[in-house]
Image (cartoon, rainbow, N blue to C red):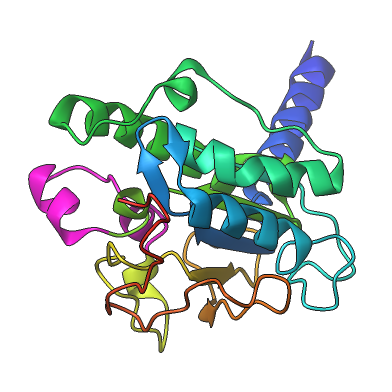
Amino acid sequence: MASLRVLAGIAALLVSLTAAEAAPKRIIIVRHGEKQAPLTLCSVGKERAQALAAQYLSPSSPMSLLKGETPAAIMAITLHTLETARPIAKAWGMKIATNPLMLTPIRNTPYFNGLINVQNRKVVADLLTNPRWHGTTVVMVWEHFHIASAALEKEFAGQQVTLRQLMHLDRINGAKVPDTWPGPNYNFFWILTYKNPTDTVPASFKVIRQYFAEPYANLPSNDWGAPEPLPAASGCT
């Protein structure tokens, strides 16, 4: 009986050690493409999704942020992010895990934002505790309100609702992480790197601006916080 208790203790210890080694090596965060309506992206947003798949998040382009590695997952959280992520996943021959919330047209209401808040917490908790992500790179195609938004954090005061809060981005040494992702910006990546698998705070934070090559060089790349120059007939809102 004593030997069984010892074996059970060893097994529990091994499980806890494995669970502790959970943080990904790198998380690439990108906002969904420009939108037309709650159901779909506009022409510029659809082109940006294709450009991301062909260049910055491509399995073969020399411009790819994923050179030499395969992402462990390409994640989305809402309908617009799913539409943006699909060409990327297709380029890698991967599937995106979906749920009913992700297939519902987004609404900027306290109730709907509350639902996304819950999902945001679930995703981050899994990323930082599930050993399947240890040592991997994960791509998150996300809503800008739920990446960083001082307004959303104020609306849900006392809760953890944005990636900035949930991933403790304000605690990264030497990094000044914006408290809000501006509405007009669809053209940046935030890249988080974890040094140790037990870390809950990223070791580094990097911003990359999107400058696409032909045939996507026409896509807007406005400064952080500046208005986005859009074609008159783009249908973007």
Where does residue 100 sit, x and y in percent of width and height?
48, 16
Q: Between 43 and 199, which is closer to the camera in this rendering?
A: 43
Where does residue 25 sit, x and y in percent of width and height?
69, 63
Residue at position x 23%, y 58% from top? 149
Q: Is residue 196 left or right of residue 183?
A: right
Q: Is residue 207 left or right of residue 164?
A: right
Residue at position x 25%, y 69% from top? 179
Query: Is residue 167 positioned above or below 88 on the image?
Result: below
Q: Is residue 215 left or right of residue 80?
A: right
Task: Quadrant for residue 63, please give it.
Answer: bottom right
Residue at position x 65%, y 76% from top? 212
Residue at position x 31%, y 36% from top? 117
Q: Between 100 and 118, which is closer to the camera in this rendering?
A: 100
Quadrant (top left, top right, bottom left, bottom right) of the N terminus:
top right
Query: Is residue 20 positioned above or below 31 on the image?
Result: above
Where does residue 159 sit, x and y in percent of width and height?
20, 42
Q: Magenta residues, as a range?
A: 149-168
Q: Is residue 66 left or right of residue 127?
A: right
